[in-house]
Amino acid sequence: MTDHGQENAQRFADAGRPAIIRIEAVNKWFDDFHVLKDIDLTVGAGEKVVVCGPSGSGKSTLIRCINRLESHEQGLIEVDGIELTDDNKRISEIRSEVGMVFQQFNLFPHLTVLENCTLGPIRARGLSKTDARALAMEFLEKVRIPEQADKYPSQLSGGQQQRVAIARSLCMRPKIMLFDEPTSALDPEMINEVLDVMTELAESGMTMLCVTHEMGFARRVADTMVFMDHGEIVEMASPETFFSTPKSDRCKDFLEKILHH
Amino acid sequence: MVRGSKKPRFGILDVIVLAAAIAAVAYVTYRVDSVLVYTWDWSAIPGYLFRYDEDLGHWVPNLLIKGLITTIRISIWALIVASIMGTILGVMRTSQRLLPRLIGWAYVEFIRNIPPVPFLFLFYFFISSQIIPLLNIGSALDQASPATLGVVEFLFGPANLIENFLSGLISLSMMSAAYIAEIVRAGILAVPKGQYEAGSSIGLSKLAIMRYIVLPQAIQRVVPPIAGQFITLIKDSSLVALISIQELSFLAMEIAISEQRFFEVWLFTGLMYFTICYACALAFGRLEKRMGRHLR
Ligand SMILES: Nc1ncnc2c1ncn2[C@@H]1O[C@H](COP(=O)(O)OP(=O)(O)OP(=O)(O)O)[C@@H](O)[C@H]1O
Ligand SMILES: [Mg+2]
């Protein structure tokens, strides 16, 4: 077992939560490029994991493997007891349990905010239009933009669009939420409105995996910090340990850069 | 790019172009009038639009109007059939699986690289001799009630010409579908990858992603080239005159020959085509403004 594998097992045993995501000895290549190297990561139900690391270190690839937007070549990924394989039926089962929020929002530009939110519930869950609408309005209220329901995404600010994207995912009532740099494409004044929504979501007990460089948010919300570099998990620790006494030089350098700029 | 004021500006170049155009028209008119010594006679045309039916006791459409109606009918049907076929083929061409992609590719290249005239003759021969008889339309219509017959005639034209009409319709649709397929394919490829990923991540199947997310956006993006293709289709419908489909051009040809009034008949026919095509262009212009305004 790798160092971080032992760390992972230890940390997980200490936390005493039932596992909801199990990633064991996962390797992935893009052609010759070894993008994920022996990744071990277990996430407990309700746990908040923040993943950080330099650009190109494989953070996006890792979380995209969890809902099979990318496929891994070696190792095991299990989500809520279902192993990820090429079986399409399992993949769609898992995808409806796992919500994902993208850096570029990826809202459907031809649909209104409300339709963006109801599409999944109607077409993937088989809800009636009325039920889907009620559900969507409930979550649009949670992200504080019910009044924008009939607008099109292009009529909203970036922060509003990202909140719609969060509501759209929540409408599938997922057990796990993945965030891939949800605030990186936003103007600074809009970052907080999105982080606030994410913080509330965390407080509601959602299992969350966030790739983000918002370290204030990470300190407040994370149970576990993961630092990746060159396709490896270099460090895995509670935020207190992670920020005060990072073990590796790579992690120290990274934190240095990101905290003092 | 900086846009100037909305007011159209009229410069020296425009004056030259306009003068040249007027001169050209004047010259052609002069040649026709005084050199060809052509005497215009439009008097035959109205009689071919409508004629008074003694037996029925009222006015009925005559050849030119009948031809126009057939042209409109065949164009609308071909538009519908070609759009459906073209969309399916366009989706096939972007498929991740090899077989559909190969079929779509072969179809498009086959049609695009054969000129319409040989294609029409080949397919007309094949369709009218092999496929149409299989449908057994003649005997089906013989047994139909008058009400059904009425509906069928409204949709497809006179019962005795239905087989002829269908042959033309299928040939025309098959040709146009190849071009629409290419446009749809380009539209699909222009939809960003993130849209597929967002669709997958809310648990939609591949089919649902195509139907509710990708195709609507692809089609909104390609309204202008599709409009152009539809107008081409209407104009190309005149080609089916070659295989004796009794539409506007076919009947105009007969009239021009029997009346010996080529200029008048063809000018008038051209004007009829222009009217339909231009009306379509205007309608699509409006549609274009309404659709796609939310796409970034
Ligand atoms: N589809 C792909 N094909 C080939 N290489 C890819 C592909 N996707 C990502 N990569 C490469 O894999 C590496 C890791 O990419 P990834 O997007 O996971 O990094 P990241 O940690 O999320 O970086 P960033 O902070 O820039 O988002 C990068 O070097 C990238 O160029
Ligand atoms: Mg990334």
Image: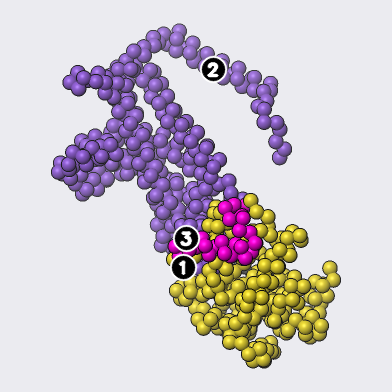
Chain colours: A yellow, B purple
Q: Amino acid at mark 1?
A: Arg
- Disc 1 is placed on an element classified as loop
Q: Nearer the viewer, residue B34 or A199?
A: A199
Could you classify mark 2 by the number of other residues whose Cα lies within 10 Å: few (under 14), some (14-19), or many (20 or more)?
Answer: few
Q: Amino acid at mark 3?
A: Thr
- Left or right of residue B221, residue B264 in this image: left
Q: Position of residue B89 (x, y in %)?
A: 42, 53
Say which of B110 and A56 sits in front: A56
**At x 45% / y 74%, what residue is drawn?**
A89
What whole-number distance in Å separates the C-alpha atoms at marks 1 and 2?
Answer: 67 Å
Q: Chain of mark 1?
A: A
- Is B278 positioned to the left or the right of A165 in the image? left
Residue labelled with disc 2: B24
Q: Is residue B252 left or right of residue A49?
A: left
User: Which of pointers 3 and 1 indicates the residue nearer the eye?
Assistant: 3
Q: Are marks 3 and 2 on the same chain?
A: no
- The magenta span reads A127-154
Q: Residue at x 58, y 49 (%)?
A: B294
Is A131 included in the stretch rendered in magenta? yes
Disc 3 and disc 1 in contact, CB within 8 angstroms: no
Residue at the disc numbered 3: A130
Q: Which residue is mark 1?
A: A125
Q: Is residue B66 visible?
A: yes
Please check the rendered image and state whether residue A54 is part of the magenta-colored stretch, yes or no: no
